Image (cartoon, rainbow, N blue to C red):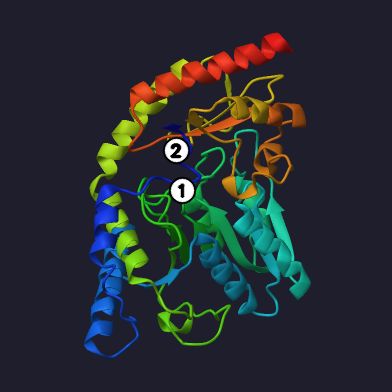
């Protein structure tokens, strides 16, 4: 099987698997005071240090969670609920992941005003539009660094500067960018392990010094009281090594992705790219062809793993809200595919997959 779905998840790095295996026997509860517990706690803290180093942070605190979805919920709901009564506007973008978009929309029931900023055909937000919305009425700005469906890189630095002028905290979903791009300036940053060749089931939320938000769950007081529950030292250790590897291999990984991107653009020259090709992470290629039924095409490809878009929303039957946000009609959106590649993808695999995808597309068009 040729794997081209890196935005959905990534294969476990061998070094990560080895690190997790090494701590499997450290079965103590990391909150226990005895020696076995202290060994487990040391595994967790080493992982925390490694992730902080990969983030390039020596300040703030890093709280382990079950993944980025939980981290984003903690950040968004916590920041909104602690905002002054005069700040009841929660601002985000139309192309955000459902973990952000749905959480922001849910705040309507608590008296907040969700403000969903539009994006252009290139998938980028207009900074003038953003500036008009991010003002003294805003409790929070939630923005994704790299879009999980179309790979577009939002101007987080400029948006953050606008927010800071108005005293608005920023939560950045850095899941797709962490380990690949410079970490953006924000008040809170959500990341996860399985997008950087780490294990599923563990993520983290970084919070700047002085930012105090309430927990979503109660009981236990772990993770500075923000995320109760017993941590898995094995998952944390895997995350730590994955983050360390991402930092160490970043330049090599980026160079490899650029090689794959250039080859992919040639191989899919007859397809249209969805979203900006300049402001984009090049490990993501979201493409479309008019008149194509992409879902049917994928079902015919038995040896290539790729997707229509977000794995979290697949199977819902709903057209991608991201593709609709950039102005695609339903017919155009139905003809879109997402290819994701990275560290373990070879040029030969990409070429083989492209041949199969293009052949299947041509066959479908002839049959139509």
Q: Quadrant of the N terminus?
A: top left
Q: Quadrant of residue 200?
A: bottom left
Q: Residue at x 64, y 63 (%)?
A: 135
Q: Nearer the viewer, mark 1 or mark 2?
A: 1
Closer to the camera in the image, 78 or 330: 330
Q: Quadrant of the C terminus?
A: top right
Q: Residues within 10 Å of mark 2 (few under 14, many from 20)?
A: many
- Residue drawn at x 28%, y 73% is 45
Tell me, yes or no, if residue 17 can be seen here: yes
Residue 26 lies left or right of residue 355; in this view the side is left
Foreground of the two, 143 or 337: 337
Camera-nearest residue between 366 and 112: 366
Q: Which mark is residue 244?
A: none
Mark 2 lies on residue: 281
Q: Residues within 10 Å of mark 1 (few under 14, many from 20)?
A: many
Which image quadrant for residue 136? bottom right
Label 1: element kind: loop
Which residue is denoted by mark 1 in the rendering? 176
Residue 306 locus on image (x, y percent):
52, 34
């Amino acid at each position: 099987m040729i794997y081209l779905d890196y935005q959905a998840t990534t294969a476990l790095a061998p070094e990560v698997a080895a690190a997790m295996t090494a701590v499997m026997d450290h079965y103590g509860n990391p909150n226990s005071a005895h020696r076995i517990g202290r060994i487990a706690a040391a595994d967790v803290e080493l992982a925390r240090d490694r992730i902080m180093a990969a983030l390039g942070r020596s300040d703030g605190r890093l709280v382990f969670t079950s993944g980025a979805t939980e981290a984003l919920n903690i950040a968004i709901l916590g920041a909104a609920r602690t905002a002054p009564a005069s700040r009841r506007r929660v601002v985000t973008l139309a192309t955000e992941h459902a973990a952000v978009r749905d959480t922001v929309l849910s705040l309507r029931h608590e008296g907040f005003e969700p403000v969903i900023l539009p994006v252009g055909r290139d998938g980028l937000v207009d900074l003038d539009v953003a500036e008009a919305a991010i003002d003294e009425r805003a409790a929070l700005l939630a923005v994704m660094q790299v879009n999980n469906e179309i790979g577009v890189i939002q101007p987080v630095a400029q948006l953050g500067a606008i927010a800071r002028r108005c005293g608005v905290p920023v939560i950045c979903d850095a899941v797709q960018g962490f380990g690949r791009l410079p970490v953006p300036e924000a008040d809170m940053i959500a990341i996860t392990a399985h997008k950087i060749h780490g294990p599923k089931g563990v993520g983290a939320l970084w919070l700047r010094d002085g930012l105090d938000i309430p927990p979503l769950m109660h009981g236990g007081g772990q993770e500075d009281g923000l995320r109760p529950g017993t941590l898995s030292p094995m998952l944390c250790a895997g995350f730590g090594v994955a983050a360390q590897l991402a930092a160490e291999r970043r330049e090599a990984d980026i160079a490899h992705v650029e090689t794959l991107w250039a080859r992919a653009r040639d191989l899919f020259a007859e397809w249209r790219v969805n979203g900006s090709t300049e402001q984009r992470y090049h490990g993501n290629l979201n493409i479309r062809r008019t008149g194509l039924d992409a879902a049917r095409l994928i079902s015919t490809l038995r040896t290539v793993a790729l997707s229509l878009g977000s794995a979290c929303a697949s199977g819902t039957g709903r057209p991608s809200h991201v593709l609709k946000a950039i102005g695609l009609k339903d017919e155009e959106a139905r003809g879109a595919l997402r290819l994701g590649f990275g560290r373990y993808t070879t040029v030969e695999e990409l070429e083989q997959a492209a041949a199969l995808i293009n052949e299947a597309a041509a066959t479908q068009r002839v049959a139509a």
